[in-house]
Image (cartoon, rainbow, N blue to C red):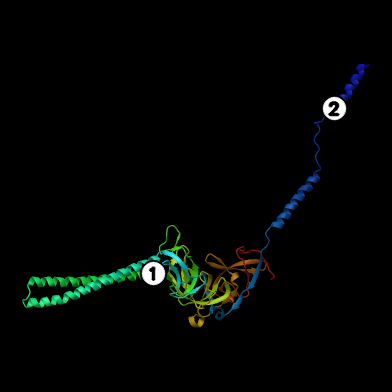
């Protein structure tokens, strides 16, 4: 009976363990395929939305209409060429001392106007004055020696003349006469030496006085101080010191009446520049101020690294607002038709921003509906009305204005309503 019960218990445990065992013979259950199709569709749709939102749209551009213009209004005073440069002073000096010395006084400040010959600094002159006192004493000694030599000569001369008469009368011997003549010649030579010594001592006094004068530094011309380089107590020298603790100048003075503009003109367009050609100058600091000027000369040498030629421009209007090293832009103007004898040119006027440069060619973009057409154009002069185009554009053409670097022939654009 007990054996039967134990067998039943073992049978129950075996059945329970069999229920807990994993049946690996059954295939694993798969999810619903429809869910995976829905997830894939959502991913694709999201990718399409992101691509559509990030794709580059048609650029928004501003436009202008090419205006027809007669040559008389466009060519008169039109700009043939624009160039940039700087205001420079033809008369500019860094004032320095002629001798090495210690600065004891500086009488200039930046922005101060000075006159030619005005004292602007002083150096320590104690050594120079001591040298002057020494040479003055030497001059006095030489003058005293000259006085003594003159007295000896004056005493020897009548004795010699008397002995000469007595020799001729055979009163004294030839030996006595020769002795008197030797004394006279010696006194005469001593007088000449004394006179030369006085001249030498006087020259040394002049040198000593000049050394004192060199300790006083004066303005070389009328101008304005643009830089103060030295302070009292510093050493200055006309020769640059290797240690860097000795100044070579006191300050910089600029003659404001000598200001002019220097610009670099591409050697490809230098043939458009002629002497005395009228120009218009615009300073970067005052872009709305047009200053009249004229070409002085084109420097007869080119810069091979930049392929440019330097041109000097005279400023006809003097103004305190014009200062050295200001940036400037110069427009080289054409002669009027009456002066040049050239028949008036015809063309259209467009804003300067409607023209771009591609190598040596000038291009513009004409709007046709929603696309643009690239046009090569030939330019004329530039005036206040705009840029003259003598070929490549017709009157009434709608051109793109602004940044043309992102456009090409056939580009789709959106035209701004402003």
Residue highlighted by disc 1: 212
Residue sitting at the far right: 1
Q: Quadrant of residue 183?
A: bottom left
The residue lying at 14 percent from left, 75 percent from top is 159
Pick whichever, 92 or 102, lies toward us: 102
> Which is nearer the eye, 6 or 126?
126
Is residue 204 toward the left or the right of residue 150 in the image? right
Q: Residues within 10 Å of mark 2 (few under 14, many from 20)?
A: few
What percent of the width, then of the height, locates residue 286? Answer: 57, 73
Mark closer to the observer (2, 1): 1
Q: Of 375 and 143, which appears nearest the observer?
A: 143
Looking at the rendered structure, the secondary structure element under dot 1 is helix
Image quarter of the C terminus: bottom right
Q: Which residue is mark 2?
A: 18
Query: Which of marks 1 and 2 precedes in the sequence?
Result: 2
Q: Which mark is residue 394?
A: none
Which quadrant holds residue 165? bottom left
Question: Alpha carbon of mark 2 to alpha carbon of mark 1: how far?
Answer: 126 Å
Could you tell me if residue 261 is visible in this image?
no
Q: Is residue 156 left or right of residue 334?
A: left
Q: Where is the N terminus found, in terms of image quarters?
A: top right
């Amino acid at each position: 009976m007990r054996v039967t019960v134990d067998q039943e218990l073992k049978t129950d445990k075996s059945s329970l363990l069999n229920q807990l065992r994993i049946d690996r013979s059954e295939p694993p259950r798969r999810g619903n395929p429809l869910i995976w199709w829905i997830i894939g569709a959502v991913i694709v749709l999201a990718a399409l939305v992101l691509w559509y939102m990030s794709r580059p749209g048609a650029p928004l551009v501003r436009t202008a209409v090419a205006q027809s213009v007669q040559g008389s209004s466009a060519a008169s005073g039109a700009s043939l060429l624009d160039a940039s440069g700087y205001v420079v002073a033809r008369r500019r000096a860094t004032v320095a001392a002629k001798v090495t010395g210690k600065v004891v006084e500086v009488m200039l400040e930046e922005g101060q106007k000075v006159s030619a010959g005005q004292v602007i600094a002083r150096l320590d002159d104690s050594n120079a004055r001591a040298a002057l006192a020494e040479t003055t004493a030497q001059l006095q000694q030489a003058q005293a020696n000259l006085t003594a030599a003159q007295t000896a000569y004056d005493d020897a001369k009548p004795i010699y003349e008397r002995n000469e008469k007595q020799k001729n009368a055979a009163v004294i011997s030839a030996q006595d006469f020769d002795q008197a003549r030797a004394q006279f010649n010696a006194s005469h030579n001593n007088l000449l030496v004394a006179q030369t010594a006085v001249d030498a001592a006087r020259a040394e006094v002049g040198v000593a006085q000049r050394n004192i004068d060199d300790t006083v530094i004066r303005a070389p011309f009328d101008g304005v101080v643009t830089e103060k380089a030295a302070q009292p107590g510093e050493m200055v020298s006309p020769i640059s010191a290797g240690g860097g603790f000795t100044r070579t100048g006191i300050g910089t003075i600029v003659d404001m009446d000598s200001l002019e503009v220097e610009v670099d003109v591409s050697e490809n367009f230098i043939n458009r520049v002629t002497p005395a050609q009228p120009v218009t100058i615009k300073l970067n600091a005052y872009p709305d101020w047009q200053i009249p000027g004229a070409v002085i000369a084109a420097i007869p040498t080119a810069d091979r690294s930049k392929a440019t030629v330097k041109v000097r421009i005279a400023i006809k209007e003097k103004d305190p607002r014009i200062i050295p090293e200001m940036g400037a832009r110069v427009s080289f103007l054409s002669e009027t038709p009456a002066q040049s004898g050239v028949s008036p040119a015809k063309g259209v006027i467009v804003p300067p921003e409607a023209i771009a440069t591609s190598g040596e060619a000038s291009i513009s973009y004409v709007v046709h509906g929603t696309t643009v057409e690239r046009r090569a154009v030939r330019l004329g002069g530039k005036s206040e009305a705009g840029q003259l185009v003598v070929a490549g554009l017709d009157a009434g053409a709608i051109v793109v204005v602004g940044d043309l670097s992102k456009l090409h022939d056939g580009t789709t654009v959106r035209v701004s309503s402003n």
